[in-house]
Image: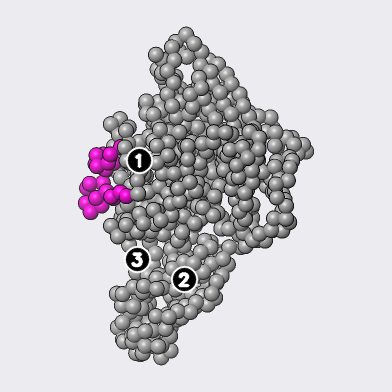
Amino acid sequence: MEYRVQPEAMPVDQPREVRVTATLDQPLRAGDNIAFALPEAWSSRRCCVTFTKEPQYTDPEAPDYVAVVAEGARFELSLEKIPLASGDPQRHVRKIVAKLIEGELRAGTDVVLELRNFRSTWLAEAGVLRVWVGDDEEKHPPKLKTLAVEAERLRVIVPSSARPGAPFKVNIVSLDPFWNRSSSTYREGVLTLQGGESLEEGIGFTGSYRTRAAIAEPGVYRLRLGDELSNPIRITPAPRGPYWGDLHSHDKTHNCGAGEDPYTYARQVSGLDFLAVTPDYRGLSQAVWREHVRRCNESYEPGEFTTILGYEAGFPESHHNLYFRGAEAEIFDVADPSQRSIEKLLAQLDPDVAFAVPHHVGIDWCTQTGYRPEWDPWIPLMEIYSQHGLSEFYSPEHILSYEFNRTRGMESKYATSVNKPVYARDAWSQGRRFGVIASSDDHMAQPGKPVKGLAAVFAPENAREALFSSLKARRTYGTTGERILLDFRINGCEMGQEVFVDGSSPLKIDMEVHGTDGIAFVEVARLRFGNQTWESAFFERLRVQRLFDATSIDEDCDYAASFEERCEGDAVYYLRVGQKKQLADWPVYAWSSPIWVTKG
Ligand SMILES: [Zn+2]
Ligand SMILES: [Zn+2]
């Protein structure tokens, strides 16, 4: 069929009337159906398709009204759920089915889908409007195109390390209020080194701009464009990242999310180094999985942008993401629901080629079943933070707790922190040696949003093998989404590792933090085994920013300290950092992977 969409494009999040005219290429007779399904993003009220809105066809004056009309014909409308294989009752899109009950339509006749009082999605994309004639789905359906609006914020993104004198990428991106690359135009921008030398002048662009810069002398630097400061970059003869990525991102695949193209968004808008799209396995047919594998491999560009193959598995023991070393993997048997257990899944996997990461553990993690230490070889990491909230320790009053979920409205109390020993600190107390990452669990194909969680990975290069090995070896940390540089060592041994000491010599603990803004506090948390209580081994709250002293902001971005303490037995330490300013109402934090101290 041929289609005409009016308007051809529309701004995001605006009340709209939309007409899609389909010119029939076959006749429709009484009793025949023509059906439409709006792009997933048009059905979501908030952050994700867990909150869907339903079109209605009874009241043209009321919101979300749909009609299907053709001259000399009358249709009877109904709504059908396009089900998710998991049977999750909340996540779905509605198929608008129009049954011809009066008249007969010849090939060449126009049938019009009308939307009235509809608010366009807040995703800027060309979303597919699915169309069926009878049972046959159209192979070349039309798209509803939505456009970003004016910028709300600007970001200057640079790699976290580079060699002296070697050119590195500078990604300048302006974002609209919905995290789309904005429609705003900038003129005559000047890119400088923080507090000094001009790198490029006369920068003009709409939406985003990419350039390169180089810095000759080793050290930690930031770039500045107008009022905007970049993330810190370390110039060093031996760069090893950290590389930044989102390991937990959903899109429209199998009705588990909305949005068409997380890979392009990750690279061009979030400036990520790596990405794992993790479709929910409950909705994965073999065909959808093959397509997922194909897109993942097609989007991989070694050295530039690494895609990691994975999927999300929800079990009685709750949610885990699975990641694979290579370009191919099979999905777990989904045919028999009784097979759905982490135990059975792990038994099928070789821990050299796959690993699992639990997430939002404080909402639910093995609360029914208990955790089994035999699973340790498959679980090197846990996701300490995502858009759902913080999984560090039980603290329902914490500003980042699940209770204050910003994607669902502050104090929505949508999710509750369970008061059970299922958090990262509990796992460490119980002897688990998990490192940490953070990742978004974004369901709108916008991975790497600056507030929803990023994973930092130290690796010799940005490629699958290197990143996979580093993830397995816990050479990682997590942030709420800002590219904060963390260095944390005990006796020279870095985060995620184990240090052996004899009883007589003290521990030397070093930390270095380079923030994206003023640092509010730096804390080293410690657990001494046998004692089983978490305490601050080191805590410094940095002086309150002096409001009228412009230089203090920049000064407070960098922090380094060392201390010594006696080792009285086995212990575990990690570094946690908070920044002074919130970003879009979200506090900015970072958490290192722990270091385990074992007395020889
Ligand atoms: Zn999940
Ligand atoms: Zn998820």
* Residue 508 visible, this orientation: yes
Residue type highlighted by circle 3:
Lys
Mark 1 to mark 3: distance in Å?
32 Å
Locate the C terminus and report the quarter of the image it occupies.
Answer: top left
For the record, the magenta segment spans: 328-351
Please name the residue shown 47% across and 31% down the image: 593
Locate residue 136: give its quadrant. Answer: bottom left
Locate the N terminus and report the quarter of the image it occupies.
Answer: bottom left
Ligand 2 lies under 8 Å from the Cβ of mark 2? no
Residue 295 in the image, given as x and y percentages of width and height: 39, 57
Which residue in the structure is indicated by mark 1?
356
The residue tagged with tag 2: helix, strand or loop? strand
In the displayed structure, 126 sits above or below 237; it is: below
Indicate which disc, 2 or 1, sits on the residue closer to the N terminus: 2
- For the rendered model, the colour scheme is one colour
Please name the residue shown 40% across and 25% down the image: 429
Crowd tier of the residue under label 3, counting other residues whose Cα lies within 10 Å: few below 14, some 14–19, many 20 or above: few
Indicate which disc, 1 or 3, sits on the residue closer to the N terminus: 3
Ligand 1 lies under 8 Å from the Cβ of mark 1? no
Please name the residue shown 54% across and 44% down the image: 481
Residue 268 in the image, given as x and y percentages of width and height: 54, 54
Identify the disc placed on residue 143: 2
Crowd tier of the residue under label 2, counting other residues whose Cα lies within 10 Å: few below 14, some 14–19, many 20 or above: many
Whether residues under marks 2 and 1 lie with C-beta atoms below 8 angstroms apart, the answer is no
Locate residue 424: give its quadrant. Answer: top left
Which residue in the structure is indicated by mark 3?
81
Number of the front mark, 1 or 3 = 1
Residue 36 lies in the magenta-colored region? no
Residue type highlighted by circle 2:
Lys
Residue 576 in the image, given as x and y percentages of width and height: 54, 31
Residue type highlighted by circle 1:
Ala
